[in-house]
Image (cartoon, rainbow, N blue to C red):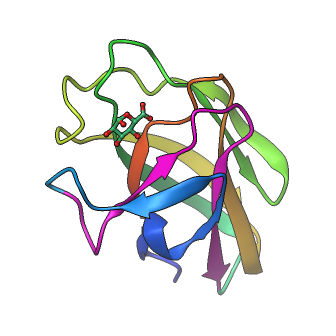
Amino acid sequence: TPAGRYEAESATISRGVAESNHAGFSGTGFVNYDNAAGAYVQWTVNAAQAGPVTLRLRYSNGTAVNRPMDITVNGTPAATGLAFAGTGAWATWQTKTLTVTLRAGANTIRATATTANGGPNVDYLDVQ
Ligand code: GCU
């Protein structure tokens, strides 16, 4: 079973940086996306067998502006423009869930910012 926690700071980061200056994160920090469309975090999740799982992304957004992201699984869109609304403060974390289907073996799950503001700060991906 691929169930477990996949920290963002341990994932592949394109145009973002691991930081720890806002409290409440899991692991050793979170990812601060660059303020740019196309910035992403990508996790690899190994599944023993194909099937549906629930993904839970933990994030914060200290602005009042939504920071939508596209979620892809193995390059295929699973959610387009998924909303990551303001959480009130960078140290206030919330979660967003979606259901996706994994294949047997290695799966890449990518969360890509779609606006010039970049993504929210992302703490982890839980696979349930
Ligand atoms: C601030 C904040 C960062 C955040 C950034 C942003 O600089 O400290 O954690 O990532 O704003 O707007 O993306």
Left or right position of 44 against 104: left
Task: Identify the residue shown where x is 28% and y is 27%.
Answer: 62
Task: Identify the residue shown where x is 65% and y is 82%.
Answer: 46
Q: Is residue 53 above or below residue 86?
A: below
Spot occupied by residue 127 in the image (x, y as percentages of width and height)? 46, 65
Residue extent of the magenta highlight: 25-47
Left or right position of 89 against 9: left
Q: Is residue 7 visible?
A: no
- Determine which quarter of the picture holds residue 6: bottom left
Spot occupied by residue 47 in the image (x, y as percentages of width and height)? 64, 80
- Determine which quarter of the picture holds residue 82: top right
Which image quadrant shows ligand 1? Answer: top left
Task: Identify the residue shown where x is 66% and y is 33%.
Answer: 36
Spot occupied by residue 125 in the image (x, y as percentages of width and height)? 45, 60
Location of the C terminus (image quadrant): bottom left
Residue located farthest toward the top when viewing the structure as drawn: 64
